[in-house]
Amino acid sequence: MDGDRGLEVKAKPSLNYNSTLGQSVQNQGFQSKARTSVMAYYGKKFVPLLVVLGLGYHNYSYCYRFCWTEVHDRLNHHSVCYGLLFGFNFIQAILLIIWLEIFIVGPGRLKLQIPPYDLSMYFDQTRNDVSSQGDFNRDKLIYNSQIYIEAPDFFICNFQGLPFWCSKCNSLKLMRSHHYNGCNACIKRFDHYCIWIGAVIGSDNYKFFISILIWFLIYFIFTVASVSAYASDIKDYETVNLKYTLNPNLIFLYIVDNFWILIVSALLGCHLFSIKRNVSTVEELQISRMKRAARKRHRKNKYSEVEESKEVEDHLYVNAKHPLHPKVRFVVRLTDKDYPYNKGFNRNWREVMGDNFLNWFNPIKLPKMKNAVQNFQDLIDNENNLISDNFKKEVLKRIDEGNCVQFGSY
Ligand SMILES: [Zn+2]
């Protein structure tokens, strides 16, 4: 179900920032770009169609060739045949409903233009004295008619300690959100574009993506198990009547379904491992990039100054407020072993699938729409809750140990 071939995730560190109030103005961090090549375009259109055709053939082989011809007509197991047909079509109906829901619910487009964070008071006043540069109203957080919002206590930032900015949406990028050109919007907790089902997967429909993987696994296991259960009967029949040969459709079905059981289990395993650490597919790519850079650094003789500065810019950092130093902020570098959003498997799982376990695999239950953000304060509260308490403690510990830079001091 996975397949990020239509996507390119790339780090574009920026050296520019709006010097007055310390917001990075370029599209920062890893940014998703839909490849506009013809192949990618047609791939996106036709792969889901191929999947539907494949399901159609699967139906023909299983329902007609196996259930009807073998079980019903040759073996005369009528009630078993009806039971298998019901089970198979029930699972398939659930699959199609979930597939539809992935589109109906959508990935979670951010429709708001979020103003930049007000970080002026933490910025090095000797370099950027905001109060002398324009008409700044601290109480209302308005500077030269531009509205600013209060920064959360902790947020993921670039090497300069600045939050990421989407120049296409002209909006602050919330943590974990990424711009996707295909939707022309920033997507909350963007995961990936799934080429098989032809949909963008983000915070809102990730639950359904996990559900569809589980139900696909059940679908293939059901098919393989029922065909296997009758394999010996079919074989017995063959020895009695020499004219009979095993139907090639059934051999093909058996091989293909076993192959898909492997693929879907591997994919589900990868996603469960990601949920265990609360990392999305794009964040996974970012971590592997950081790991590659770290490995290169260990082989120091091959590590140039250019690469070092690129690594500094490619890395992720966290901008934090320390309770003992309210007038300054600190920038702490993340390592490839840091998982800022990891709250333990149980909470991570509930963050994705919802709190009520009765609804985890219930394809009919739609999630509550979280898009209706009342005001920017809700957004900031939400941002504050994204980072786990353990990680916040770890960041404060690193600040106490001096493994940080004061924000605005460079
Ligand atoms: Zn955007």
Image (tube, helix red, strand yellow):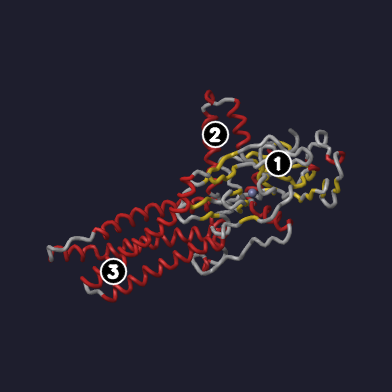
Q: CA distance from mark 2 to mark 1?
A: 26 Å
Dot 1 falls on a residue whose secondary structure is loop
Residue 396 seen in the current view: no
- Disc 3 target residue: 67
Q: From the viewer's perspective, is residue 77 above or below residue 222? A: below
2 or 3: tag closer to the N-terminus: 3
**Identity, as a three-letter code, of the amino acid under mark 3:** Cys
Q: Quadrant of the C terminus?
A: top right
Toward the viewer: 356 or 209?
Answer: 209
**Identity, as a three-letter code, of the amino acid under mark 2:** Ala
Outermost residue on the bottom side: it is 79
Q: Quadrant of the N terminus?
A: bottom left
Residue 239: which quarter of the image?
bottom left
- Disc 1 target residue: 25
Q: Check disc 1: other Cα within 10 Å, few if <14, some if 14-19, many if 20+.
A: many
- Disc 2 target residue: 293
Respond yes or no on whether mark 1 lies under 8 Å from ligand 1: no
Q: CA distance from mark 1 to mark 3?
A: 62 Å
User: Which residue is depicted at the point 75% across and 34% down?
Assistant: 409
User: Which residue is depicted at the point 61% across and 38% down?
Assistant: 12
Q: CA distance from mark 2 to mark 3?
A: 55 Å
**Do the CB atoms of the residues marked 1 and 3 lie less than 8 Å apart?**
no
2 or 1: tag closer to the N-terminus: 1
Dot 3 falls on a residue whose secondary structure is helix
User: Which residue is depicted at the point 87% across and 44% down?
Assistant: 135
Toward the viewer: 49 or 213?
Answer: 49
Q: Check disc 2: other Cα within 10 Å, few if <14, some if 14-19, many if 20+.
A: many
Residue 146 picture location, percent across and down: 79, 48
Q: From the viewer's perspective, is residue 356 above or below residue 115? A: below
